[in-house]
Image (spheres, grey):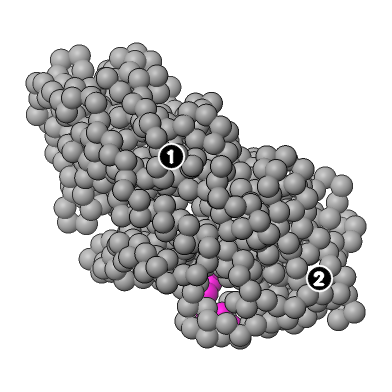
Amino acid sequence: MKKLLTVGTITALAALPIVALPVSSASAEEDPTLADALRTQLALGLQTAPKSAAGPAARSASTKPPGANPFLGHVLDANEADYYSWSRYLAAGAEKAEAARDAAARKSADPAVVQNMLLAATTPLPVGEQEPPDVIGDNDSVEDAELVEGLGSGRRDNARSVVAGTLAQAPVGETNEADFDEDDGAIPLSNDTGVSEEFDVMTTSAEVGDGPHGSEGSGTGDFDFYEVTAAAGETVVAETTVSGGTDTVAFLYDDEGTVLATNDDGGVGLASLLQYQVPTDGTYHVMVSGFGFGTTVPVDPFDPASGLGAGSEGPYDIEVAVTETDVDYYAVDLRPGDVLGTSFGGGAGTVQVVRPDGTEGVGSSQDLSSLYPPASPLPGGGNGVAAYVVAQAGRHHVAISNGTGAYTGELEVYRAGLEVDGARAVQTVFLDFDGERLNTAVFGGPGVRTLSPLSSYLAGWGLTPDDEPALIDAITAEVQEDLEADLARSGLNRFFDVEVLNSKDDEDRFLVDRNVSRVVVGGSIAESGISTIGIAQYIDPGNFGHEADSIVLLDLLSTTAGNPNSINTFITDETDDVIEAVAQGVGNITAHEAGHYLGSYHTFQFNEVANIMDQGGALGNIIGVGPDGVIGTADDVDVDFGRDVFVPSEGLTGVEDTLTNTEFGLTRGRGAPQ
């Protein structure tokens, strides 16, 4: 998983507030210090779960990792999500998935799919970078971006462009081949590399674990610090080379001990590749540690003995430099409801989309396009692939970075929702409470299974069969508030429309009529064969699919109090109305699963912003439990779609606008774009 937090992407992460929400790993429950360390590691974009695709028994990248797909599913414990292995697996299948999407589109009779297929078949607009191949600085900022004229969704625009450019290699100056002694396990003990006061580059061979606090010493963990000096605007680059299963993680600290950037697995194999453009003149510290469960980051970077245990240990080589880094910016004029798809490869490793207000909408150093549905026209297959739904009309910017040499990429613009599907087309979301026989393989499950109805789980919440109609009505009302009322009130999209129906009151038209998606609310982990609370079939920026499936399993949500994934854990005698409390929890999770196939990825569950798209592992956040820790009381939080940071460990950077994604994903048909 090439997860690189690069130029301009780390600001929100560095200041990210982390709240004390439950971490359900048994060892963490018994050790609050470990729980804090795990949350810190996750907030820095570093997974804590073992990497099943790494090490001596590594699975092939084309072999599906165990467990539920964490990009699509509600994880039960954030410390069990193996993003490294899933990211490699999804990237390995991206080219095949794109070919399958093309084949499906050619066979489709859906007017929206046909229209987008015609747009995708047009001769692309050629775009050649104007900055000379060996020059850095001509187009390296928003202000100096090269405008891509003629790309857009208007009648006279071209929907596709092919971009070709080069990321220049900065000149390499004098290199210092250094040899350092332990202990270098804290900022005050940081090795003086001479970069950039005496040298441009420092190389050395070292070992994680050979210090006094490695596994053969105190066992608290070995951390290697390297000091560099950099001026504002210069880029600190640190790259490791590993062998023998060593799994390095690289950090950049400022002199005050704040983490500015991290990288795990951005280099070759389990090696690290970190680069960060520093904001001010000063002294900075590159730190290398070994990947581990809550042991990757020291508790106190000024104390070499503050680690919580030894992670991966072994030899590595490292090159540290302070240099210029080429970043190429392209400008695109877009309008609300446009869906910008990007895919860049070759010498480029990262793509970022910057809003007109200067905030980062999305950044990616990976390819998750295999999560798109067959009807999606968005491109994939690159090193950095991202999709962005436009809320604000104006000039957006696409930044290409993280590499050297020639690159090629695609910028494509389509309209979201059912807009091109005729005047009367409206998205329907059907809530199925009756139990269902379905093929769970579409969610990564074992195949055809039968899921029990909602009625099978009423007793778990202390409810009776007579309560079922009221509970269905209340869950439906909660989903209607999340997907209908709140979005309609926003005024963001005057062509917004959606119908939320349920199996108590309406006929099931899923897979019968076009433009009907479904959420099956019922069943268990054992019945589905998927270890999750909920999971969606696709992530569909732009909602090009219109017919997608998802499930919300009820066994854990209705199990006894004390389980961190049970609504009962948050129900007490102070709860005003149990039916309303259960409906609030189940309804929000149901809207969350629909939110995936309406265009959104996960948002970060361990910060102070409650978002419908928050990942699992912090149930109280998504179901709206207030400060009193009890659901169904006056201080409950109305959890909605809105802006929040992506889950750092899922590899996307920036601030996701799940309100915009959902509202424009629910655009009703009104003919071809004007």
| Label 2 crowd (10 A; few <14 / some 14-19 / many >=20) | many
User: 586 or 98: which is nearer to us?
Assistant: 98
Q: Give the residue type at disc 1.
A: Asp
Q: Secondary structure at mark 2?
A: helix
Magenta region: 527-534
Give the residue at x 14% y 39%.
205
The reply to whether discs 2 and 1 touch (Cβ–Cβ < 8 Å) is no
| Tag count | 2
Give the residue at x 9% y 29%.
177
Q: Is residue 127 above or below residue 192?
A: below
User: 424 or 503: which is nearer to us?
Assistant: 424
Let me know if residue 531 is in the magenta part.
Answer: yes
- Which image quadrant: the C terminus? top right
User: 244 or 261: which is nearer to us?
Assistant: 261
The residue at which mark 2 appears reads as 472
Q: Give the residue type at disc 2.
A: Ile
Q: On the picture, is 250 further left or further right than 389?
A: left
| Label 1 crowd (10 A; few <14 / some 14-19 / many >=20) | few
Q: Is residue 27 above or below residue 385?
A: below
Asked if one can make out residue 553 in the rendered structure from this viewpoint, the answer is no
User: 70 or 551: which is nearer to us?
Assistant: 551
Asked if one can make out residue 165 in the rendered structure from this viewpoint, the answer is yes
Main SS of the magenta part reads loop
The residue at which mark 1 appears reads as 157
Q: CA distance from mark 2 to mark 1?
A: 46 Å
- Residue 407 position in % (x across, y down): 22, 40
Give the residue at x 64% y 45%.
659
Q: Is residue 490 above or below residue 597?
A: above
Q: Secondary structure at mark 1?
A: loop
Let me know if residue 522 is in the magenta part.
Answer: no
